[in-house]
Amino acid sequence: MRPLLNRESPNSSNPSSPFPSSVADLTDYCSRRLAGLETGPVPDIGPGSAAAIWTLFGAATVFLSLRVYCKVWRSRGVWWDDVVLVISWVCVNFLPLPLNPFPIPH
């Protein structure tokens, strides 16, 4: 594999490089981690991912609710595109629960 950043060229020999010489490429870290040379805790991105997912879920729910409310309130009627959006929102949020192949152990 080709490394993302070249470690052989430090900043002293290439002063125009925007990257510091201490930046390691990802393939080097991964290979050292797999070889057991890199120890310590693995970076946890779970809380940030959960926050982003719940924020986007809330925003999508608010915009979908406002869209349907405004269509009904202005008497424009709910058309097939609104029905498809609501059905897809329900399927994405409630259908995966019974079909989950990896249930949470109790």
Image (cartoon, helix red, strand yellow):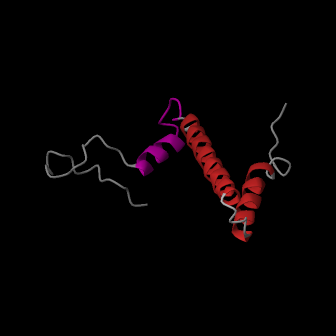
Q: How many marks?
A: 0
32 within the magenta span? yes
Q: Position of residue 6 (x, y in %)?
A: 29, 53
Q: Determine the residue positioned at 42% across, 49% down.
A: 26
Q: Is residue 41 left or right of residue 73?
A: left
Q: Quadrant of residue 84?
A: bottom right
- Segment colored magenta: 26-43
Q: Is residue 4 left or right of residue 38?
A: left
Q: Is residue 40 left or right of residue 58?
A: left
Is the N terminus in the top left, top right, bottom left or bottom right quadrant? bottom left
Question: Between residues 62 and 32, which one lies in front from this camera angle?
Answer: 62
Q: Determine the residue positioned at 47% across, 36% down.
A: 38
Q: Is residue 47 above or below residue 25?
A: above
46 within the magenta span? no
Is the C terminus in the top left, top right, bottom left or bottom right quadrant? top right
Q: Quadrant of residue 68?
A: bottom right
Q: Determine the residue positioned at 54% across, 37% down.
A: 48
Q: Determine the residue positioned at 29% across, 49% down.
A: 7
Q: Residue furthest bottom?
A: 80
Question: Between residues 60 and 42, which one lies in front from this camera angle?
Answer: 60
Q: Position of residue 98 (x, y in %)?
A: 86, 48
Q: Position of residue 8 (x, y in %)?
A: 26, 50
Question: Between residues 51 and 36, which one lies in front from this camera angle?
Answer: 51
